[in-house]
Image (tube, rainbow, N blue to C red):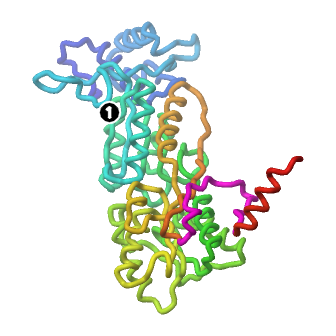
Amino acid sequence: MSSSIDPGSATPLYQQVAADLRQRIVAGVLPVGARVPPHRELARHYDVSLITINKALAGLVSEGVLHSRVGRGTFVAVRPAPPALPAPAGGGADARPHTGSGAPMLGFVLRDLSSPFFSLVAHAALQRADAAGYGLLFSSSLNRLDREEEQIRRFLDLGVQGLVIASMSRTYRLSEPMQALQDAGIPFVMVSFIEGEDVPFVGGDLHDAGYLAGRHLIEVGRRRLGYVGDRFGSTMFELRSSGYRKAAREAGLSIDDRFVFEYPYEGEWNDYRSGRTIGEHVAAMAERPDAIYVHNDLGALGLMDGLLAHGIRVPEDIAVVGLDDIELAARASIPLTTVRQPTDRIGALAVETVLARLRGEHPPTRQLLAPELIVRRSCGAPAAARTVDARPAPHYRRPRSLAERAALATAAEAPS
C-alpha cells in the first residue's frame, strides 16, 4: 500500500487517496492538462478497491480539480492552492513568512542568503510576489549542490506552486531534480546562468556586459587588457569574456594570455579572497596589464586591495572594472567602476514568469536584460565622465574629445 495511505486512520480511504492526488497536482507532479493514470493502475498503486478510486476521483471532479472526457480518461483541470500549513505548537502566527494563511506560495532557492548580488534579486522577487498575493519562501543551498537538490524537493513537499532557483551547479546544465521539474511541467525559472534554449532563464546579458567594460577601458586609453574569470574553459568564463574580447578585436587589440586569470578558490564567499590573491600576483609581474575586467564586484574589490597593498596604483597603473554593482562597489576606498546587472528587474521578472506559467501562458524562455556601465574612479575616467552610462546602440561610438562632443551637439541642434 502507498505510504500516503493509512488503513488504520479514521479518515476514509477515498479521502486519503483524493488528498494524495491533490497534493501531487499542487506539487506539479501531475501538471494541468495531464491525464490521470487509469483507475486500475491507481487501485494497484494505493492498494485499494476500484470503488475507492472511483469515489476519490469523483470528489476531485466535483471540486473542479479534475475533469473527465468520455472515452478518453480523467485529466487535471486546475492546480489548486496548497493547503495551509499548521500553526506552530502552542498557537501563534502562521508558520509561513510573508503571507496570510490562505495565500498560495512560491519558493526561492538561493546559493547563499548573504550573497550581495542574489540578496538584491531575492528582495525584488519578494516585493513582486507580495504584490501578486503570493507568499515567497526562501531557502539556502549553503553553496552545496546536494543541499540545493534537497531544498527543491522540500519545497515541492510543502506544496509551493512554482520555484525561482539560483543554482550552485558549475556545469551550467540542469541537475537531475531540475530536469525532473522541467519534465513534470512545474513552473520554475533560473536566475543563475544555465545552458539550454528550452530552460527558463532570467538574467543580465553577460556578453554585452563584457563588451561595455572592454569598450570603455579602450576609450579611456587602456591597451594592455586583462581579465579575471571563475574557471578556465567553463561556459561562464567564456560567456563573460566573449563581449570583452569582441571590444578588443574591434579596436585592433588582443588579450595577452599572461593577463588572463582564474579564481583560485571555489565558492562565492571566496571571491574577494580570490581577487586579492590575483592582485598580489599581478603586482609581482614584471610586465602588467594596464586594465583588468573582473568576474564580479567582490573579486574586483579584492583585486584592488591586493594591488594597492603592493604599491600598484588604481587607476593610474591599472584600471579595474567589476560586474554586478553591489552596494560595496560605490563605498570602496577607490569607488569601483562596474557593469550593473538589473537585479530589481531580474527578481521581479523571474516571479512574473513563474506566475505567467501558472496561468497557462507561455512567456519567453530566455529573457536577457540589458546591463549598464557605472563609471567611478577605479577606471581612470575623467571626473566629468563619472556618470551612469546606459547601453548605447551597437553602432554608436562614444565621442572621445570635447571638440567631437561639441560638433555632435551642434549637428543635433541644427534644423533638419
In the image, is residue 393 part of the stretch drawn in magenta?
Answer: yes
- Occupied quadrant, residue 402: bottom right
Question: Residue, x 46% and y 11% (percent of image)?
Answer: 64
In the image, is residue 197 part of the stretch drawn in magenta?
Answer: no
Q: Position of residue 290 (x, y in %)?
A: 54, 80
The correct choice, above or below, for 331 with respect to 61 in the image is below
> Of 69 and 345, which appears nearest the observer?
345
Q: Position of residue 45 (x, y in %)?
A: 36, 26
How busy is the neighbourhood of tag 1: few (under 14 within 10 Å), some, or many (20 plus)?
few
**Magenta part of the chain:** 380-400
Q: Position of residue 351 (x, y in %)?
A: 47, 35
> Residue most toward the right?
416
> Residue most toward the bottom?
286
Magenta stretch, overall SS: loop
The residue identified by callout 1 is: 157
Question: Residue, x 54% and y 76% (percent of image)?
Answer: 291
Q: Position of residue 197 (x, y in %)?
A: 61, 48
> Of 280 and 186, which appears nearest the observer?
280
Find numbered disc 1 in the image and state the secondary structure of the residue it sits on: helix
Q: Is residue 183 left or right of residue 273?
A: right
